[in-house]
Amino acid sequence: MAARYYDPTLPMSEADSDAALPAIDADALITELRNIIPGDGVVVEREGLTPFECDGLMLYKALPLVAVMPRSKAEVQAVVKCCARHRVPVVARGSGTGICGGAMPHPEGVLLDLAKLDSIVAIDPLARTATLQPGVTNLRISQTAAKHGLYYAPDPSSQIACSIGGNVAENAGGVHCLKYGLTVNNLLSLEMLTADGELVRLGSDGLDNPGYDMMALITGSEGLLGVVTEVTVRLLPTPPCARVLLAGFPSVRAAGDAVGDIIADGIVPAGLEMMDKLAITAAEDFAQAGYPRDAEALLLCEVDGTEEEVASHTERVSALLNKAGATSVRVSDSEAERALLWKGRKSAFPAVGRLAPDYYCMDGTIPRSRISEVLEEINDRATAYGLSVANVFHAGDGNLHPLILYNAGDPDSVAKAEKLGSDILSLSVRVGGAITGEHGVGIEKLAHMAEQFGEAELRQMEEIKAAFDPALILNPGKGVPILKRCQEYRALPGKHNHG
Amino acid sequence: MGDISTQLAHTVAEAYRARTPLKIRGGGSKADVLGRDVEGTPLDIAEHSGVIDYNPAELVLTARAGTPIAEINKLLGEQGQQLPPETPALAGKATLGGSLACNHSGPARPWQGSLRDMVLGTRLINGRGEQLRFGGQVMKNVAGYDVSRMQAGALGTLAVITELSLKVLPRPETTKTLAYSLSAHDALDVMRQRATEPRPLNAACWFEGTLYLRLSGAKAAVESTAQLWGGDSVEQPPWQAIADGELPCLNQAGSLYRLSVPTGSALAPSDSVLIDWGGAQRWVYDQPEIVAAAVSERGHAWLYRGGDRKNETAPPLTRTQRQLHTALKNAMDPEGILNPGRLYSWL
């Protein structure tokens, strides 16, 4: 069955052999786009297009036919209508921080850069809502809301740069998901352009949704069903107090058991992160946060709330960690110390990046009880390929981020890293988990969708895609494999450059 | 009690071939509310019942759609856990599948989310009688479209829900309810203000001249907040009666409208018999004009109970919204056999 899906490892010529789209009149398209966006907002030169050739996943690259940078909703709408008329693929892009290749351009299509739509439309402190254009960065929402004592909870580690539009497209997570939910749980309404360029509002500023919950469907749909032009999010009161506990453990299993103990005791931590020995060492070298270098695993557990609540939970968590066999437990005493303890975790990716020329970040989710067995198997496989893997883990919600160390300059190393990555995704599915917890499918995990889903499910998703986008112009070739139409539609470009 | 999913799928497949409309029924607890009256061959889900998997340390419960909410509440309660949305049990009749199909939530909904927010995965039967599985039993899963969550509020018009995996949460250590004698307007102001404070508030409602606030969480935090906010401590709080729709003010004769609006909406505060969800849900009688008014407030209103249930009961949609609804319905139920007309006459 797998052979029926697009295989991202196929060279472009093979995948493209049966393409039957009408030829695009590129000149007419570009002229129309220039009429819509005056000035320098339409780019066709190679050097201008290169910054858009990939998102944060540099393994997959392609140059678009043309990139457009509209400055208003009206311009975005006109662009989408123009693409619909020409039946040209449209790939929407926020800040390009995604790491599944979801925003990689289509070589025959328009790259729609929404970064210039970056206004905060409104903040209503009493309703606790913020209405935003799609290019507003995640962190800016919380920074702007801070003067009202409010914040936006989902905080992906790219929050300084990533946009709310991209967060919606990928249903972004972060370290606070277990307690505060994912993007989908923190949205009130969306305004979206359909594939033919009609504006439609989904959700409402009340809590419930009229009719079908299309907002849930759009969230995480990777730009395949519409182009989001406005987002209204829910804000939360900023907790007055937060403390983080750092505990070292002699084994991954002991750390994993401690996570279960904390949750079984009735505490839902604001953040609960695990790192393995290689990640600990790399993070400590990088951040000097005082992580226990002798530990096989460490846990960071943040509790937040009122002073009284935090004091009570700190005491309980501390006792549980000790009981679970922690070799060291440290509790942050000040905001500075809390920031330092998080610094190691938050810089884990770049820190691990110093250990090898390149790293490849995976994103499986697994039932938490399977953690030690999964980590053991990952390490066994890595050893067999002659590669190293550092593991950081949103332990509270079972979201694993193995970082595969490799050398992009060495084709053999690249091939092994991709094979190991693929093995890890398969392993996640086999233990009852998912191929992606928060990074998305994009182009990277397309082939693995057939492991996660059966043919009937894939067909159902394809029909949903066609219901929203019958001409298949919205981010084609990403997210959900197209079964019957893959032959009639231009397939995806192969990766022609390893970054 | 058991697994009858194969039989259910077979019945749906037959109906698909014969183009026979089906009327999906769980416990029958919400037969007279929310949706329109429709005809169809009954498809009973109640027998497809039972908890399949529950691991308190994973905070995940998986159960068949016909499982009564009351049974789930009991099981969770034994482990000190709960369904976060305070899903109404409706005298033991409400089922898990029906509760998701209606996305029915209790007073905790603004703070703890709705059943829609708790969904991790589903098993469904689409309008062709195919058994499908979306999502899973893990907390985070962004592979593919979120077809599971989309069933929330669809009133069974997209698929037959046969199984659900949900995130559950620990019960709070302590709860305490405070009461204040206030007009509806003043109560709304207080609710909105209190909701911006970082305090353990998790329910706020007003009816019959009294504002009720519920605190819930660590004992010390609840006590200190209660001291700070004052008010009368209530021994028998109204939350359960509100969740189950048993308040006398919700059971008068007439057409009952349910408004879902922004908390700052000026719509009908003084006409409301009940304001719940911190101001975001309001209940009024016999005001058909409120349906259109709610839309202009970026909210919506349902004809919840009573009135002409052959006519539309759900909030009106724009032309584009209707087009997307029709296309989505066709994608999941091409012959239109699943609860046709239950959500909208044209769907």
Image (cartoon, rainbow, N blue to C red):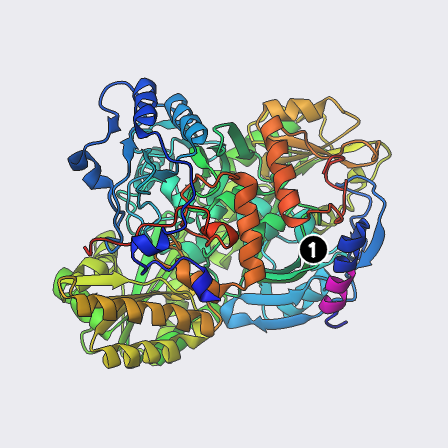
Specify the quadrant that holds the C terminus of chain A: bottom left
In the structure shown, which secondary structural element does the residue marked by tag 1 occupy?
A: loop
Q: Is residue A480 above or below residue B309?
A: below
Rendered location of residue A38, percent (x, y): 28, 18
Q: In the rendered view, would you say A217 is above or below A264?
A: above
Q: Quadrant of residue B312?
A: top right
Q: Amino acid at mark 1?
A: Arg
Identify the residue under disc 1. Answer: B128
Identify which residue, B75 or B273, lies in the foreground.
B75
Range shown magenta:
B5-11
- What's the chain of the residue with tag 1? B
Instruction: Give the class, few, some or many, for how many residues have Cα within 10 Å of label 1's Cα (few <14, many ≥20).
Output: many
Which residue is found at the position 54% from the left and 71% from the top? B56
**Residue A216 at x, y = what percent?**
53, 46
Residue sitting at 17 percent across and 70 percent down?
A: A281
Residue A340 can be seen in this image: yes
Q: Nearer the viewer, residue A234 or A390?
A: A390
Prevailing secondary structure of the magenta residues: helix
> Which is nearer the eye, B277 or B336?
B336
- Is residue A136 depicted above or below A314 in this figure? above
